[in-house]
Amino acid sequence: MADLTPAQIDARLKQLHGQLEAAAELSDLHEQAAQLADVSGDHRFHITHAWVFALVAGDDARIALLEARLRALGGL
């Protein structure tokens, strides 16, 4: 993951919105956003989105890691 500022992450998420071929990058961006968020609803929101885009991308390793994180946060 590249170190992006919150504004850069937001801009890139908006740029890629609706582009399912960019699912892997969208998953990565949401993980980065989650790291910047505290352990609040925003954190779980971004982890959930990272998981969904990992599912779309077919990234089994990332799916498993994100599912474990979501379970630890009380999700899934």
Image (cartoon, rainbow, N blue to C red):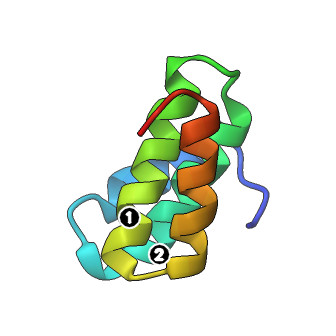
Residue closer to the observer: 71 or 22: 71
The image position of residue 18, as x and y in percent, is 20, 63
Where is mark 1, residue-wise? 53
Identify the residue at image location x=41%, y=40%. 76
Task: Give the residue type that dot 2 points to.
Answer: Ala
Q: Secondary structure at mark 1?
A: helix
**Number of labelled discs?**
2
Task: Give the residue type that dot 1 points to.
Answer: Phe
Say whether disc 1 or disc 2 marks the residue closer to the N-terminus.
2
Identify the residue at image location x=45%, y=63%. 26
The image position of residue 37, as x and y in percent, is 66, 28
24 to the left or right of 34: left
Residue closer to the observer: 31 or 9: 31
Where is mark 2, residue-wise? 24
**Mark 2 Cα-neighbour bin, 10 Å: few <14, some 14–19, many ≥20:** some
Residue closer to the observer: 45 or 13: 45
Farthest left residue?
Answer: 18
Farthest right residue?
Answer: 3
Residue 30 drawn above or below residue 15: above
33 to the left or right of 50: right
The image position of residue 49, as x and y in percent, is 40, 48
Q: In the rendered image, which quarter is residue 66 located in?
A: bottom right
Camera sees residue 7? no
**Mark 1 Cα-neighbour bin, 10 Å: few <14, some 14–19, many ≥20:** many
Camera sees residue 45? yes
Using the numbered discs, state the Cα–Cα distance from disc 1 to disc 2 in whole angstroms. Answer: 6 Å
Q: Secondary structure at mark 2?
A: helix
Residue 63 drawn above or below residue 41: below
Q: Decide: marks 1, 2 in contact (CB < 8 A)?
A: yes
Q: Quadrant of the N terminus?
A: bottom right
Residue 2 drawn above or below residue 35: below
